[in-house]
Image: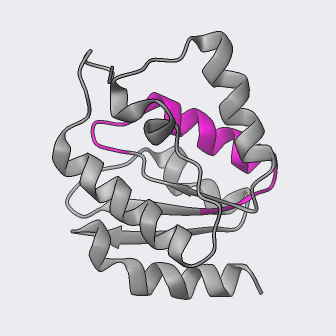
């Protein structure tokens, strides 16, 4: 279940599915712990999810993260791992929300691009442009 013990809200699931579908249609191998855990219906134990998430980040070229509001502790940990590993990072920041100074400070540690959005599926053009530039 989600952090409040329930499945993610349908709106967020649809946004994530749209984003993952877009990335996969472009040939990216997109991994998502939310998807893997069936949008909150299946909770992995800390012993299972922690090393699994770290391994996914280690083998990735780019981490695409949505910190959430309220902030997702898991995403913040993953951002820390990715920055410590020197990974390229794209952070989607929803307009109208405040994010941690540590998130805003990521460019000091690694190649990080922020994309502000109102609706995730309206960011695909910006996302494609950023992905192209990061993969050059």
Query: In which image quadrant can residue 129 be found?
Result: bottom right
Residue drawn at the location 73% of the way across and 25% of the way down: 51
Left or right: residue 50 compared with residue 24: right
Residue 79 drawn above or below residue 90? above
Residue drawn at the location 48% of the way across and 78% of the way down: 127
Residue 61 drawn above or below residue 25? above
Residue drawn at the location 52% of the way across and 45% of the way down: 32
Q: Specify how the rendered protein is coloured.
A: one colour
Depth check: give the residue in front, 70 or 43: 43
Left or right: residue 32 compared with residue 56: left
Picture coordinates of residue 77 (x, y %)?
59, 33
Depth check: give the residue in front, 110 or 12: 12
Residue 63 drawn above or below residue 54? below
Query: In which image quadrant can residue 6 be found?
Result: top left
Depth check: give the residue in front, 21 or 3: 21
Magenta region includes residue 80: yes
Query: In which image quadrant can residue 5 be found?
Result: top left
Left or right: residue 102 compared with residue 34: right
Picture coordinates of residue 20 (x, y %)?
46, 61
Magenta region includes residue 82: yes
* Image quarter (top left, top right, bottom left or bottom right) of the N terminus: top left
* Image quarter (top left, top right, bottom left or bottom right) of the C terminus: bottom right
Residue drawn at the location 54% of the way across and 68% of the way down: 24
Picture coordinates of residue 98 (x, y %)?
29, 50
Picture coordinates of residue 63 (x, y %)?
63, 56
Left or right: residue 100 compared with residue 120: right
Q: Which residues are magenta?
A: 68-89
């Amino acid at each position: 279940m989600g952090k409040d013990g329930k499945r993610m809200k349908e709106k967020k699931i649809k946004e994530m599915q749209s984003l993952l579908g877009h990335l996969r249609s472009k040939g990216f191998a997109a991994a998502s712990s939310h998807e893997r855990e069936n949008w909150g219906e299946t909770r992995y134990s800390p012993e299972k999810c922690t090393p699994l998430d770290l391994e996914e980040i280690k083998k990735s070229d780019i981490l695409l993260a949505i910190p959430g509001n309220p902030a997702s502790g898991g995403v913040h940990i993953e951002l820390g791992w990715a920055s410590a590993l020197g990974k390229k990072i794209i952070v989607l920041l929803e307009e109208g929300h405040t994010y941690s100074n540590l998130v805003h400070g990521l460019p000091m540690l690694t190649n990080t691009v922020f994309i502000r959005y109102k609706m995730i599926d309206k960011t695909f053009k910006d996302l494609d442009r950023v992905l192209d530039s990061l993969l050059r």
